[in-house]
Amino acid sequence: MTPTPELALTIALIALFGVLVNALVTAYNARKRGSIDERLLKLKAEIDHVNAREIARVQADHAEKQKIREFERTQDLAGDERKRKADAERFASILELLDSKNIMVFLREHDFGGAFPRNEIEPLNVFVNLSGDPDQTFLFDELEQQRLQVVQKARTLSKLIGVDTHPRQGDLISVLPEDYVNRIRPEWIEENATKLNNAATEFVSAFDEMVLTCRKKLAV
């Protein structure tokens, strides 16, 4: 059956309308995709901006922390140098009091079974008496701990000398009382002499260790 011109026109219009609708839908979808792509590009730009700002902040914080660490390191070095100079002076005063008075030579060599001049151990007593003075302390903890060990040994030796020795002729003192001269020595006299010799050895050992540590730490 051949369609009438009116039907053919209607069919053509319907087909044209369908094409137009498809074109409009396609255009709408394309525009919609374009809007989405535009929003995505805008969002990416915002994210890149935030990231760049965050990276700049982190870099600035790192640079600031580096400056602080460098400043603290410089301060530490300056502080260590001040402590080194102060401790070197204290170390020199200890050496002047003990080493230069030959008391260390005396303590290394003397057998406390025999008599000795009282003034030989005077520097030891002075060292003990001054040991509690804050001006005598080291600023470096390592050195101060060793100084305290020396002080402890010095106090023990000084106390034993005071308790276990007796006056002899002139300025001499000895573990042997005057009444026992030219007599057989009792065992307790030999024991006292041994205690003093051991205490002197321990003091000298602690002193030598402190001296070595000070020379390394203070470069003197």
Image (cartoon, rainbow, N blue to C red):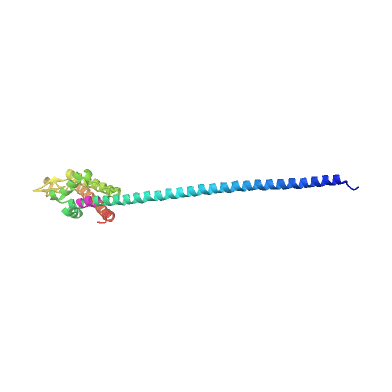
Q: Nearer the viewer, residue 111 or 63?
A: 63
Q: Is residue 187 visible?
A: no
The residue at the far right in this view is: 1
Q: Nearer the viewer, residue 79 or 29?
A: 29
Q: Is residue 213 left or right of residue 107?
A: right
Q: Residue at x 85, y 47 (%)?
A: 8
The residue at the far left in this view is: 170
Q: Is residue 64 visible?
A: yes
Work out which quarter of the rendered image holds the C terminus and state it: bottom left
Q: Nearer the viewer, residue 26 or 41?
A: 26
**Residue 117: where, in percent of width, then height?**
12, 50
**Residue 83: where, in percent of width, then height?**
27, 50
**Residue 50: where, in percent of width, then height?**
51, 47
Residue 92 within the segment the image draws in magenta: yes
Q: Residue at x 34, y 50 (%)?
A: 71
Q: Which residues are magenta?
A: 87-93
Q: Is residue 46 left or right of residue 169?
A: right
All told, the count of numbered labels is: 0
Q: Nearer the viewer, residue 122 or 58?
A: 58
Taken as a whole, is the magenta stretch helix, strand or loop? helix
Residue 83 within the segment the image draws in magenta: no
Q: Residue at x 83, y 46 (%)?
A: 9
**Residue 202: where, in percent of width, then height?**
25, 50
Q: Is residue 62 left or right of residue 97?
A: right
